[in-house]
Image (spheres, coloured by chain):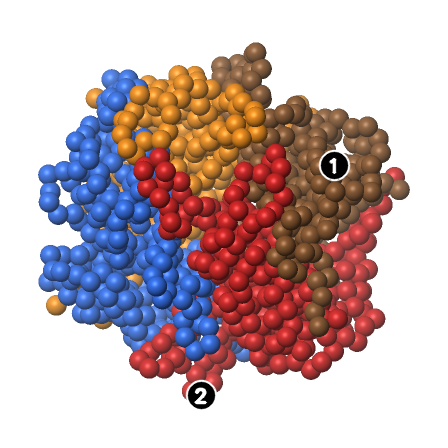
Chain colours: A blue, B orange, C brown, D red
Amino acid sequence: MAILHHNAYGKSCVRLTKVVRGPHRHELSELSVDIQLEGDFADSYLTGDNRKIIATDSMKNTVYVLAKENDFRCVEDFSLLLCRHFISTYSQVRTVTVDIRETKWDRIQAGDRPHSHAFVAGGSELRTCRAQLDSKSTKADLTGGIAGLQVLKTTGSEFSDFVSDRYRTLKDSHDRIFATSVDAQWTYGSQPSDFNADFAAIRTALLKTFATHHSLAVQQTLLAMGEAALAVCPSIQSIDLKMPNQHRIPFNLEPFGLENNNEIYVPTDEPFGMISGTVRRQ
Amino acid sequence: MAILHHNAYGKSCVRLTKVVRGPHRHELSELSVDIQLEGDFADSYLTGDNRKIIATDSMKNTVYVLAKENDFRCVEDFSLLLCRHFISTYSQVRTVTVDIRETKWDRIQAGDRPHSHAFVAGGSELRTCRAQLDSKSTKADLTGGIAGLQVLKTTGSEFSDFVSDRYRTLKDSHDRIFATSVDAQWTYGSQPSDFNADFAAIRTALLKTFATHHSLAVQQTLLAMGEAALAVCPSIQSIDLKMPNQHRIPFNLEPFGLENNNEIYVPTDEPFGMISGTVRRQ
Amino acid sequence: MAILHHNAYGKSCVRLTKVVRGPHRHELSELSVDIQLEGDFADSYLTGDNRKIIATDSMKNTVYVLAKENDFRCVEDFSLLLCRHFISTYSQVRTVTVDIRETKWDRIQAGDRPHSHAFVAGGSELRTCRAQLDSKSTKADLTGGIAGLQVLKTTGSEFSDFVSDRYRTLKDSHDRIFATSVDAQWTYGSQPSDFNADFAAIRTALLKTFATHHSLAVQQTLLAMGEAALAVCPSIQSIDLKMPNQHRIPFNLEPFGLENNNEIYVPTDEPFGMISGTVRRQ
Amino acid sequence: MAILHHNAYGKSCVRLTKVVRGPHRHELSELSVDIQLEGDFADSYLTGDNRKIIATDSMKNTVYVLAKENDFRCVEDFSLLLCRHFISTYSQVRTVTVDIRETKWDRIQAGDRPHSHAFVAGGSELRTCRAQLDSKSTKADLTGGIAGLQVLKTTGSEFSDFVSDRYRTLKDSHDRIFATSVDAQWTYGSQPSDFNADFAAIRTALLKTFATHHSLAVQQTLLAMGEAALAVCPSIQSIDLKMPNQHRIPFNLEPFGLENNNEIYVPTDEPFGMISGTVRRQ
């Protein structure tokens, strides 16, 4: 006999554009929101009895209604607001998890200053967050994050002295290109936090450390970047980093009688190294 | 002070085409392999000392070398083989995790029979597996799976009698389209298993149950599909199913003086419902 | 001074699911439709006067309304119907172009026969068509097509004796993998046509020729496939084929003391060869 | 009988990273290059005789070799250089077409100034160009361009007074969001040109006009943007613009007893309007 061991359901990729029309300038946020519920929903699985099911279409409506009815300054606040709504409104909900991804829009530079209501896409990077609230808790677990922060440095990166055995063909390198797409998630602790300031400080620390750290391994730079984030932001307790090694492979110019002095590379998407680590405040 | 709490690294998306050239026909497999290692690698993070690091480039080489040196009948066997290699070769490895995705290729029908060496792509679905081995274990944890199995039924699906409150605008439906992309992962237990036969039996059971189950909720069909998989395959202990509800929304023809008798729909990618569940043998 | 030299506008990617509910089985079609209009629309560009502009939102509505009001057996018929609608309804339209892509859905095999209303996705290939009608013509230009027909053969393909000079490093090969994603478009002439039968016959001819033609170059196989299509389908006048060479590169096993007897390859997405040709009936 | 009416072949998506290591800072360019040849290549199609075929693999090598052997300041120069190479080296080539796409990398801001060798991805936009050279010409046709320039304004956009008929449901709007992904290609004439300065000037003109033009229709803004580009750059003769209308649809808050004062929208990917136009210097 089979039993239903675990279940969850929700709505994913609810896309929202919110414009706050201030007297002098407009604020724009474009979000994609995922909501997942766990709780007393087994009857729907077992017999198709949906009386406790909040339709995922209603979850979608809720995102728009709450976005209208509430002022919020950042995705972290909106995710907490959504969590509290589902826990306080529906007694059958035991745990709610909200994930948000925010697109980066920069103001178009018009003359010597940023335009009041016109924007240009600010790259592939996303600001992310996850809030999770349990019906028995008063406080949600909250992580902030950044995803798809694409960076590259043309020097200041080495990789040498690693295991030599039958399976190794890669040579030691003391000057290679280091390219990655940083994916970071940090957990907020109990300290009060200005989420926008924290996000900006962590993003700057990650970029600056990537640029200036002399790298002996992707691993080493990852740890340095995590340490830098913890150093600039007392509100966070730990940071989880994923840094794919997006290889630029020196093109072999020897068959053509030429020497490749670290000038000509083939960028490749696959395969890629995948380096990860979690750094915690002690 | 910050500490390195967790670390892992590896190579992702190592793509392999292997051809086994039999006397009468060729066997083709196209795989994408991910390898992740955990173990005694902290020195690389802490000081850039890479002496215990197996380069991810060497992992890539290992995939091709082991594919050449070994006969294997399926992705499950190859993933186990890779796990055992890393644990037995490198004492600094504590845990190895191997994920494989296999593209579906069908033989081209040439005249009245399948061609010996020509293939046509068999859709977006992937056969997947994950093996994980610990240096202290003799037996790996193994899951088989299928991802991206896109299915749709034009009737035999209802959704009604769910929570009515301020946030609901969706009407009860007693005849709707049900479309999903099934993502299933099943765990193998201790029984001996013919992985190819098991995969085929589970895939058939999932498709047949989807087609014939009268659905009162995606949740209910998901459970029925999980039970069917467990019923046809004694080797597996549990199955985890993720079934996004890929909505086909009836187009409102009223403004044009027409009635939509469940004929004309708008397929949408976003947002989508996401229903999941784990079904276990008791 | 600048002048508006050319203009066109329309709606792209209008997605439609249509279900025809027969007494014994349902027919399913899922389409993505693009409509482009040229004509007397310059005022909208020059002064923002939109009085002759048919909103692209209205074009979208038209797709659903016409899908409801008309029986059609195939994308070719629907594209012609849309063309005639726009030309006959709006005098300001000079030329209308309709492109349709249809997803491949196969019936789920239930027991020993195809299910009446449940489907499984039939791969990445799309059936395509383009109809173009001018207000001064009585007859539309019509092309049928297939896109993304992914095929691979493990032998029966050579490439040798090509230009040898400083830029060549590739060796002659007398046995290589040949993989491609066929994109074909054929033009219908004046003969009456059963579009569904023609599509099926051309698809079969393309697959069979790919499988059985001994290839000395992708170019040669492309021509043979085009000739085969013209041979099986008297209604078409010409066929345009695009066949990217999706390389499988033999992995160099020499550093590991192994020989690669055409068994172990690296599939690559980029770069790819791109071979094209148009074959015409004389 | 069938004849080969047209043929072409080449290599697509040759990806190149080039680093120029100056004493004080590094210059980075990442390109994806397509090369297509037309000429005396029919024998390969007709009989598999490849003696006049330059392997697409050799074309790939050529990209890297010429990138090494030549200094070039921009993609336009590199595309011209590649064209001239193929025409002057191979007498069987009649026409060569080179397309290049360049990724946008911005320098990481380190302290108060741009870093000398560390970069962050500058968004989805690509700088593009196409050069085409005929063996009988002394001068190539050259277009510069930008693709994927994603912009959005929250006000200053109307759309009203368009055709009202049975198929219209969209209401007049005097304040809507205008979002698009600009794709522009401009043709260079006979005047001398500083391609980098021209690109920067055109990009700035496109952004500024988008931001400040009061839009009565996407069509009108497109023309204004094209005129602005021609005005700032005397070297170009014409500009071709494609501007998909990436709809933000006001979410209907009425069922929830709320009013949507242009605050809450649903961003959608499909369907989208597609507006295009070519603007020429008279």
Residue, x 63% and y 75% (percent of image)? D231
Residue, x 38% and y 49% (percent of image)? D261
Residue, x 50% and y 53% (percent of image)? D174
Mark 1, Cα crowd under 10 Å, few <14 / some 14-19 / many 20+, is: few
Q: Is residue C177 visible?
A: no
Task: Determine the secondary structure under disc 2.
Answer: loop
Residue, x 37% and y 46% (percent of image)? D260
Let me know if marks 2 and 1 both belong to one chain. no
* Nearer mark to the viewer, of 2 and 1: 1
Task: Please give the chain letter of the residue carrying mark 1.
Answer: C
**Where is D108 relative to D217, above or below?**
below
**Which quadrant does the N terminus of chain B fall into?**
bottom left
Residue C58 % position (x, y): 59, 40
The CA span between labels 2 and 1 is 68 Å
Residue in the foreground of this view, choosing between D228 and B118: D228
**Where is C25 relative to D220, above or below?**
above
The amino acid on which the numbered mark 2 sits, given as a three-letter code, is Pro
Question: In which quadrant of the rendered view does residue D53 lie?
Answer: bottom right
Q: Residue furthest top?
A: C23
Residue in the foreground of this view, choosing between A261 and D177: D177
Residue B275 % position (x, y): 33, 32
Left or right side of A276 for C100: right
Residue in the foreground of this view, choosing between B276 and B115: B276
Residue B205 % position (x, y): 41, 21
Left or right side of A88 for D31: right
> Which residue is tagged 2?
D23
Mark 2, Cα crowd under 10 Å, few <14 / some 14-19 / many 20+, is: few
> Which residue is tagged 1?
C88
Task: Please give the chain letter of the residue carrying mark 2.
Answer: D
The amino acid on which the numbered mark 1 sits, given as a three-letter code, is Ser
